[in-house]
Image: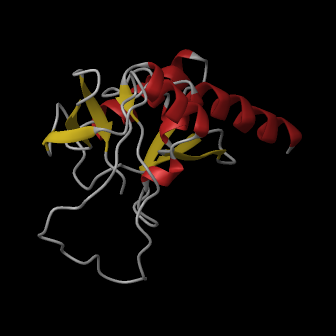
Amino acid sequence: MVTTLLDARRARRIAEQVPDPELPMLTLADLGVLREVSMDPDGTVVASLTPTYSGCPAMAEMRAGVAARLKDAGYPRVEIRTVLDPPWTSDWITPEGRRKLAEHGIAPPGAAPARAAGPVPLVLSPIRRSVTCPRCGSADTEETSRFAATSCKALWRCLACREPFEYVKEI
């Protein structure tokens, strides 16, 4: 039992270091998508991931990355599970992950909106938010495009330093 627990902890430390394919400065642990790593009695390592978005195209790469790292570390049997409930929230990005985003010129998300249990309301009007420029720290910014290179980011521009930057949307 102790060996299994130690192996599970070692497997988790390995899985935590897998980089996100879309934001490679972040690990899956920084992003908050690595939910659990455990070991079945037969020695199979089970890693559970939660996608940031339903249908997130990076999930296949995340799954493959975790499986490859664990197999390379000597775990011959690896199972990757997708966990959808509860759904991922940008609040799960660690403080270290937020720091890394800002260091790489990407504005980290604010707090996710509080919602009651049940269906997510559809809001058609623009959401007003204040986003601080990760380069100069100014709050004098504007959104230039709701979508960036990935659907979880938007494009913004700082009106003070005139630099464009990406912003990770809060969910």
> In this rendering, would 32 be left or right of 162?
right
Q: Quadrant of the C terminus?
A: bottom left
Task: Tell me, yes or no, if residue 77 can be seen here.
Answer: no
> In this rendering, would 108 be left or right of 58?
right
Question: Residue at 78% of width from left, 40% of height from top?
Answer: 4
- Give percent across and percent down for residue 158: 26, 30
The residue lying toward the viewer, choosing from 105 and 56, is: 105
93 vs 82: above or below: above
Task: Tell me, yes or no, if residue 34 can be seen here.
Answer: yes
The residue lying toward the viewer, choosing from 111 and 83, is: 111
Q: Quadrant of the N terminus?
A: top right
The residue lying toward the viewer, choosing from 129 and 148, is: 129
- Give percent across and percent down for residue 46: 55, 44
Question: Residue at 47% of width from left, 45% of height from top?
Answer: 33
57 vs 171: above or below: above
127 vs 95: above or below: below
Q: Residue lying furthest top in this view?
A: 72
Q: Residue lying furthest right in this view?
A: 2
> In this rendering, would 115 be left or right of 155?
right
Q: How many marks?
A: 0
Q: Quadrant of residue 19?
A: top left
Tell me which colouring the rendered structure shows. secondary structure
Question: Residue at 42% of width from left, 38% of height from top?
Answer: 108
- Give percent across and percent down for residue 95: 59, 38
Q: Quadrant of residue 127?
A: bottom left
- Give percent across and percent down for residue 21: 33, 26
Q: Quadrant of residue 89?
A: bottom left
The residue lying toward the viewer, choosing from 113 and 51, is: 113
> In this rendering, would 116 be left or right of 146?
right
